[in-house]
Amino acid sequence: MEKLTGLKKLKTAVFISGTGSNLKNLIKFSKIKKTPISINLVISNFNKAKGLKYANQFKIKKKIFNFNNIKNTEKKILTLLKKEKISFICLAGFMKILSKDFIKKFDGKIINIHPSLLPKYKGLNTHHRAITNRDKFTGCTVHYVTEKLDSGKIIMQKKIKVATKDNSKSLAKKVLKLEHKLYPAAIKKIFS
Ligand code: GRF
């Protein structure tokens, strides 16, 4: 495996399941001058994921896997990643859990963005939980992916205030905006 340092742009795959605003943002980031990554592949577990349109728009190779048989699917994904010489993976709203074996093969080369201030609120419904608990702050985290869900080493976090009038929807919107700042910053940090 290639080391995550140096001047060469790392061939990166982005895994998505939904809207893909983080994907779009990472594509934009991959096109600026001093970027450490190039995005060469988009993988989705859902053929109707809205974010796939960005792969089309920016002419990036995309592939959909249904994940019915995880072992088989991951084997196919690994073959594809090898073929495309991918050495870095960004999960961006990807709703499937990758196996321990898969993660081992890309150890330290898979990162994820999560919409909470980890270790608070691992898993789903993070904004709802922040509202229910009347948290004063929330935010987002970019972390390394390990076999334990949302528990890998934290690379970077960004924090915002929760307003008294916020609900989970308004909070999700605010945090997503913050995510778009955080994800590129965290990638820059890894390579700096
Ligand atoms: C983001 O909030 C991300 O943190 C979470 O799912 C959402 C995906 O948004 N895991 P998008 O698909 O990147 O627009």
Image (spheres, helix red, strand yellow):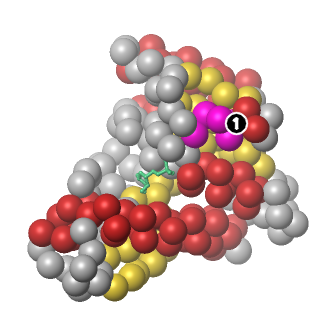
Outermost residue toward the front? 165
Which quadrant of the view contains residue 54? top right
**Crowdedness of circle 1 by 10 Å Cα count: few (<14), some, many (20+)?**
many
Q: Is residue 11 left or right of residue 15?
A: right
Amino acid type, mark 1: Ala
Quadrant for the C terminus in the image: bottom right
Residue occupying the point 34% across, 69% down: 171
83 vs 62, nearest the viewer: 62
19 vs 102, nearest the viewer: 19
Which quadrant of the view contains residue 64? top right
Q: Position of residue 146 (x, y in %)?
A: 39, 49
Magenta stretch?
A: 51-55
* Residue 156 visible to the viewer: yes
Q: Position of residue 126 (x, y in %)?
A: 26, 60
Quadrant for the N terminus in the image: top right
Residue occupying the point 76% across, 38% down: 57
Kindly report the secondary structure that dominates the magenta region of the rendered protein.
helix
- 26, above or below 42, in the image: below
* Residue 10 visible to the viewer: no
**Which residue was labeled with disc 1?**
55
Residue occupying the point 29% across, 49% down: 148
Q: Position of residue 103 (x, y in %)?
A: 45, 40
Q: Is residue 41 left or right of residue 18?
A: right
Residue occupying the point 51% across, 68% down: 177
